[in-house]
Image (cartoon, grey):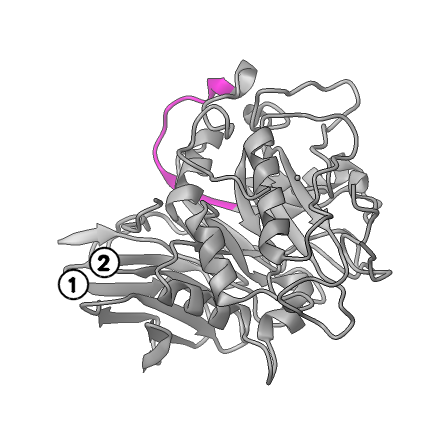
Amino acid sequence: MKRALVLLAACAGPDVSPPASPTMPAPADVASGGPLVSEANPAGAADVGDPGDLADPGEVGELGELDGRSGVDGRGGAAEAIAEGPEVWLKGSTHVHARASGDSSEPNGNVIAWYEEHHYDFIVLTDHNRVSELAPASDTRGQITLRDPHAGLIVFSGIELTHNPIGCLPVGDPSRNCRIHVNLIGPTARPGGRLEWAERRSHARLDMYRAALNAQTSLGGLAQINHPQWLWGMTPELLAELARRGTRLVEVSNAAFSKWDAGDASHLSTEALWDAALARGATIYGTASDDAHDYHARGRWPPGGGWIVVHARRDPRAILAALTAGHFYASSGVVLEHAEIDGDELVVAVAPSEAGKYTIDFIENGQRVATVPSKVGRRAIPATGYLRAVVTRDDGKRAWVQPVRK
């Protein structure tokens, strides 16, 4: 018997130029094709030149079920009119910036055009401390998208709640600079101008993240913790607590922050941090993003270095529901055909059309327990704890498969 599961992927190393867009595989079973789905229970001062280094405009409210407040059922208007259809593979980016962010010069139209030209199905426009409309005359209040999804690329509303304080606890970088950045995907509210939301009375990171999740309660949307190891300070206990409070997504890879993702001798990598939170019972899914700000070859933070691939109907509500349930994988270049539970085993396969040599590492409760030099691998799910997989191509690109538990 085959059960479905979740995938997640991250970026391996910096991307100087955007990689080629992978072809989306058709749904398939281990034998004859089956979709990738999930069994998991979804239950300051700034450093000049860093993305998000803006004047900061508060606490972590719980996410609950996807409902009208979160924007899933509260769109109204033309965005409601997507017809029922089959579940397909949809490529998207959950972390995209445009001119309103203040550290990007690109107009919204050019940003949308780049992702359309590179065969994305959806993006989330996450300007710093703003839920940006696409044009001054637009009014999409109550909707989770910023334009009619029939228009082509689905453009979700979004915001990167951005707070850059000094002196956070637990302590991070010796500079004492901190980064508390949380995306909301699909908020229905449209506050005018820059949003003031940050916690400024407490130095505790949990209090600062609580302020972001309180903003989520007001604005709606699905929360994603961005580049958790930037300037260090995120801990397994904190990440697990944020998951317990309803946060469902964390960037395991961010193409703009590959140095921080990798960790160092004194700090966990984002992947190891994720494992440590999972070991504490957290239910949280990993994303990969490009965190794009610059859409020309000369830019420091170009698009295309990381994305997710969601298995859902081509409908904004269905995409958000799939993200909440972990029905997606994330990638820095590896294209998967499927990842699923077959009986008591986790089975992972790279799309047959993909070139290169691959290894599949199985991670059980934070430890690598098997390495398979192949495009296809399987491993028994442990009686306790979790099992996940990491797929690595010979050029260093990767995909991370979501954890499964019995």
- Element carrying mark 1: loop
Find out whether residue 359 is within the magenta segment: no
Which range is magenta?
80-91
* Residue assigned mark 1: 344
Name the residue that disc number 2 marks: 341
Report the residue at 72% width, 20% height from top. 138
Residue at 74% across, 43% down: 128
Work out which quarter of the rendered image holds the N terminus and state it: bottom left
Pick the quarter of the image with the C terminus: bottom left
Q: Which amino acid type corresponds to the residue marked 2 in the rendered image?
A: Ile
Place of residue 404 in the rendered image (x, y in percent of width and height, measured from the top left)? 29, 60
Figure check: 143 above or below 233? above
Q: Quadrant of residue 97?
A: top right
Q: Nearer the viewer, residue 361 or 191?
A: 191
Q: Count the marks.
A: 2
Q: Residue at x 73, y 40 (%)?
A: 129
Does 99 sit left or right of 257 as displayed?
right
